[in-house]
Image (cartoon, grey):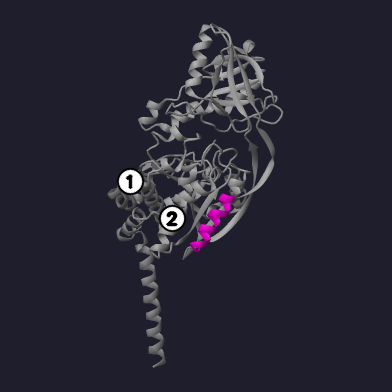
Amino acid sequence: MKSAIKKTLSLTVLASSLLSMGAIAAANDAATLGQIRDSAMQSDWAYERLADLTDLVGPRLSGSRGAEAAVEQVAAAMRKLGAKVTLEPVKVPHWVRGEEKAELVEYAGRPAGITQKVVLTALGGSGATPAAGLTAPVIVVRSFEELKAKAAQVKGAIVLFDVVFDQEMAERGHAGPAYGAGARFRTQGPKAAAELGAVAALVRSVGGANYRIPHTGVTLLADGARIPAAAVTAEDAMLIDRLSARGPLKMHLTLTPQTLPDADSFNVIADLPGTDKADEVVIVSGHLDSWDLSTGAHDDGTGVAGAMAVIDTLNKLKLKPRRTIRVIAWMNEENGTQGGKTYFENNKNKVEKHFAAIESDSGAGRSFGFVGSVTPPMVKYFAPLTTALQPIGAGIFERRDYTGAADTSPLEHAGVPVFMPLVDASSYFSYHHTPADTLDKVSPLELKRHVAVMTSLTWYLANMDENIGRTPKQD
């Protein structure tokens, strides 16, 4: 009798175990993926969190009180969802904007008593002019080769890098390359000009929608050679170019930013623990800091809100992932990427436990699917996911060898597959790094679609049976 009971209990345990395994195997079935997609498309939770971040906190440049308040707000929201929250200390740059103004004070044909105002904004990391400003000739260049060719004129002058943003390229689906072509003059141009003796450097704003709005961003100046550096509007760059064709011109420039000692800040890490593969991690993330000119709605409030909403969506459906889902709100992507670098340093001995990482930092334009750095043979395993996303028009999987996402870059270089939402960025660079990057520019519908893609992708990765592999990037 005892033997029979024992056998019955053993069969019961085995059946229970098989049922459990069946539940795990079914985690990525069509019904579950459909529930996740539909739940995300019906929820305003992410938009409400985005409104909290942009309207209540506002600008969040690293080292600022805004950045500090954002850490507190996001951590509190994630704790309310029941996530295990960790604040990871990060040492961040602390640069603050000061006075910024300019005018053209000498040019051929200038009527007596007339000057021309130039609309500009300091670049992150810019040095300062004297408090009263400086006056110097302006030299226009359109390439680094032209800068070198005009080296004799550059010394003692203000250099303007007049490189046009290719909006047509952006509108044809190539916004990233269009931005990259201009951004290298912003990041490297002032340094190159300083090395040739320029007293200041200007760059034509990198972005579209020319409504005389300057686009800021980081420049790679170093201590000891921080010349004043600013972005001018497209309209003012064109004015300077036209006037320079008439003859020599001079500008009076005043920029008074400060580079303060590095500040203490945090990455916000929120874990939804996994079940049978809890020691493996799938990251879903966005960066919490923003430039100081606006409230950073697209860049990157939508990325943070979308990542946070992954846990909210799964909680509503009472779904538990096999692998741990880790939401990260990175600090200091804009002017240092210290958040991503710090996380990697703290986890470099656990890289093999990072199954995949998702980073959202291209705004919340229309989502068409996702991008991922997996090997070609792995693409077929994502068919159930792309099928589930087709009803909302987001079923594209674009495979790349390397995504180039910023904060997850160290992980990707170490071989962790990285994914990003595939979004329409044709108008993203119209608002990017400008005073116009505000909540009203975000479509609630497109943010829902964004969350549907982010949550479906995160869940799918967290429950895959297949090992999607690792391909360390060779530099």
Check disc 2 and report the residue beneath it. 310
Residue 194 rendering spot, x and y as whole percentages: 65, 22
* Crowding at mark 2 (Cα within 10 Å: few <14, some 14-19, many 20+): many
For mark 1, give the secondary structure: loop
| Residue identified by numbered label 1 | 394
Mark 1, Cα crowd under 10 Å, few <14 / some 14-19 / many 20+, is many
Determine the CA span between mark 1 and mark 2: 17 Å
Q: Amino acid at mark 2?
A: Val
Question: Which of these two is toward me, 218 or 278?
Answer: 218
Tell me whether the residue at label 1 lies in contact with that at label 2, contact meaning CB atoms closer than 8 angstroms: no
Going by the numbered disc 1, the residue's amino acid type is Ala
**Label 2 element class:** helix
**Is 80 within the magenta?**
yes
Q: Is residue 285 visible?
A: yes
**Residue toward you, 177 or 255:** 255
Q: Tell me which numbered mark, 1 or 2, is placed earlier along the sequence.
A: 2
* Residue sitting at x 54%, y 45%: 414
Query: How far from the left and from the top, in percent, is residue 380?
Result: 34, 48
From which residue to which does the magenta span run?
A: 69-83
In the image, taking residue 126 as reference, residue 401 lies left or right, namely left
Where in the figure is residue 452, as x and y percent of width and height?
A: 37, 52
Q: Position of residue 83 (x, y in %)?
A: 51, 61
Residue 211 location, quadrant: top left
Q: How many numbered marks are there?
A: 2
Classify 53 as above or below 474.
below
Q: Is residue 64 magenta?
A: no
- Residue 359, can we see it? no
Quadrant of the frame with the C terminus: top right
Give me the residue at 40% from left, 27% from top: 167
Kindly report the secondary structure that dominates the magenta region of the rendered protein: helix
Please state which of residues 422 and 366 is positioned toward the viewer in this rendering. 366
